[in-house]
């Protein structure tokens, strides 16, 4: 853990901001690298039905651009001496977080317990739980 970077996935929620503070503190303590990740879910659609004025790929690209803007704003508000690497990946959140952790040989994942609220919280997979159960490295789940 003390040699690999810390990976902190974010969905830009308040809970994720809380987890981010823990992740930065741990990276400073262990003097390791820091990686901030946001995953954009691939929009679904059928171009044959002409429901969307743009294709799902165009929509996903737009979502990635918006996430990059939010990532820049988030980084601007941080008070840290750390060099922070940022990534935006497209796909299933659990799959992409685990892939990034493996590819980057992270020492630990620091993730928020949940970002969704209300009905959405009950209808979607708990990303933090799935990551904690499947990750090869230690996972700190922050409430």
Image (spheres, grey):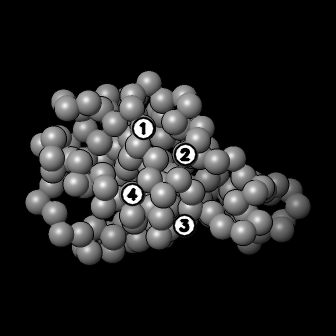
Question: Which residue lies under the disc numbered 2?
Answer: 128
Q: Earlier in the sequence, mark 3 or mark 1?
A: 3
Crowding near the residue tagged with mark 2, few <14, some 14–19, many ≥20 C-alpha atoms within 10 Å: many
- Name the image quarter holding the N terminus: top left
Spatial CA span between label 3 and label 1: 31 Å
Q: Which residue is mark 4?
A: 19
Examine the rendering and report whether any part of residue 35 can be seen.
Answer: yes
Cα separation between marks 1 and 2? 9 Å
Between label 3 and label 4, give the one nearer the viewer: 4
Q: Earlier in the sequence, mark 3 or mark 4?
A: 4
> Marks 2 and 1: in contact by CB < 8 Å?
yes
Residue at 47% x, 70% y: name it: 14
Residue at numbered disc 3: 62
Cβ atoms under marks 1 and 4 closer than 8 Å: no
Element class at badge 2: helix
Q: CA–CA distance between discs 3 and 4?
A: 26 Å
Q: On the rendered structure, is 73 left or right of 123? A: left
* Alpha carbon distance from label 2 to label 3: 26 Å
């Amino acid at each position: 853990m003390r040699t690999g970077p810390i990976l902190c996935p974010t969905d830009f929620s308040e809970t994720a901001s809380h987890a981010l503070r823990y992740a930065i503190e741990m990276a400073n303590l262990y003097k390791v690298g820091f990686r901030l990740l946001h995953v954009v879910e691939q929009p679904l659609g059928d171009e044959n039905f002409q429901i969307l004025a743009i294709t799902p790929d165009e929509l996903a690209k737009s979502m990635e651009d918006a996430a990059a803007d939010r990532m820049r704003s988030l980084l601007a508000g941080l008070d840290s001496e750390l060099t922070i690497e940022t990534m935006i990946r497209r796909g299933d959140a659990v799959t992409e977080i685990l892939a990034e952790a493996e590819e980057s040989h992270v020492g630990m994942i620091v993730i928020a317990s949940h970002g969704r609220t209300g009905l959405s919280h009950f209808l979607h997979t708990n990303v933090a739980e799935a990551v904690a159960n499947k990750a090869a490295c230690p996972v700190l789940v922050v409430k």
